[in-house]
Image (cartoon, grey):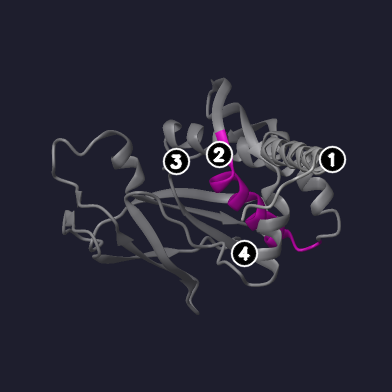
């Protein structure tokens, strides 16, 4: 037997349904509210053997970090943080995973000094989540991956050598004539070194080969190792890949 609803009961149900629709609409709108436009700029003087192209890329990367680190959401959530390494790792993670629509809006070069200004859409709701994960050991901020390459581990040995282990996710053929464009950039290991004040000392790009001296083809799943001497005045480092 089907229970009958009175008119007043139906009205109550309709009111509840309407409230649910309002709540659902609000929940769907929240992510939009958390997306904020950010801008940042950076000026960088480079030296040999770094090329102008590498310097421009570095300047734009640092400009994005500047945009994230000065955003209201990051300032509010990190006001009590005194650990510069933790703060830097937080900014790097946010920039690499929680930013969309990044654009270069101004770029210039005078002699060996390059300048870059960028704008992007920052997903500010990620700040608290990423901060909690990093302070509780939920993730390893030094690891990274893209569609072609995964950074498995990075460690510093007693003599100051940085040892990076990476794994191919796609076939990386350095001899192939068709191996160009974005996949080519995705197969490079990026390494940044910072001094004790968090200032960048050196940034470099290293092709992900199976061995340092050859082996131009890496098949999916194969692992390679990169050894890099840490600059004398470097205290911390970051290993990452181009997204």
**Label 4, on which residue?**
235
Looking at the image, is mark 2 or mark 4 nearer the viewer?
2
First to last magenta residue range? 82-100
User: How far apart are labels 2 and 4 at the CA level?
Assistant: 20 Å
Q: State the residue in front, 121 or 39.
A: 121
In the image, is 135 to the left or to the right of 76?
Answer: left
Would you call the spot at circle 3 few (<14 residues within 10 Å), some (14-19), or many (20 or more)?
Answer: few
**Label 2, on which residue?**
61
1 and 2 marks in contact (CB < 8 Å) = no
Mark 1: which secondary structure? helix
Residue drawn at (26%, 61%) of the image: 212
Residue drawn at (65%, 65%) of the image: 134
First in sequence: mark 4 vs mark 1: 1
**Label 1, on which residue?**
8
First in sequence: mark 2 vs mark 4: 2
In the image, is 92 to the left or to the right of 229?
Answer: right
**Label 3, on which residue?**
48
First in sequence: mark 1 vs mark 2: 1
User: How far apart are labels 3 and 1 at the CA level?
Assistant: 81 Å
Q: Residue 78 in the image: x percent, y percent?
A: 80, 54
4 and 1 marks in contact (CB < 8 Å) = no
Quadrant in the picture for the C terminus? top left
Looking at the image, is mark 1 or mark 2 nearer the viewer?
1
User: How far apart are labels 3 and 4 at the CA level?
Assistant: 22 Å
């Amino acid at each position: 037997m089907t229970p009958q609803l009175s008119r007043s009961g139906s009205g109550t149900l309709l009111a509840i349904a309407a409230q649910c629709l309002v709540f659902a609409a609000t929940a769907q709108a929240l992510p939009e509210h958390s997306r904020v436009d950010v801008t940042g700029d950076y000026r960088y003087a480079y030296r040999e053997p770094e090329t102008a192209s590498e310097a421009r890329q570095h300047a734009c990367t640092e400009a994005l970090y500047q945009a994230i680190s000065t955003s209201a959401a990051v300032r509010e959530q990190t006001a009590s943080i005194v650990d510069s390494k933790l703060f830097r790792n937080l900014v790097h993670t946010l920039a690499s995973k929680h930013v969309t629509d990044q654009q270069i809006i101004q770029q210039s070069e005078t002699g060996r000094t390059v300048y870059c200004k960028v704008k992007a859409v920052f997903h500010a709701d990620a700040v608290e989540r990423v901060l909690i994960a990093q302070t509780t050991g939920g993730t390893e901020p030094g690891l990274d991956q893209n569609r072609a390459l995964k950074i498995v581990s990075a460690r510093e040995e007693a003599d100051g050598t940085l040892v990076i282990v990476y794994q191919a996710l796609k076939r990386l053929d350095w001899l192939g004539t068709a191996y160009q464009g974005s996949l080519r950039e995705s197969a490079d290991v990026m390494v940044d070194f910072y001094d004790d004040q968090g200032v960048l000392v050196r940034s470099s790009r290293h092709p992900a080969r199976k061995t340092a001296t050859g082996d131009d083809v890496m098949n999916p799943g194969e692992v390679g190792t990169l050894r890099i001497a840490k600059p004398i005045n470097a205290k911390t480092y970051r290993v990452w890949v181009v997204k």
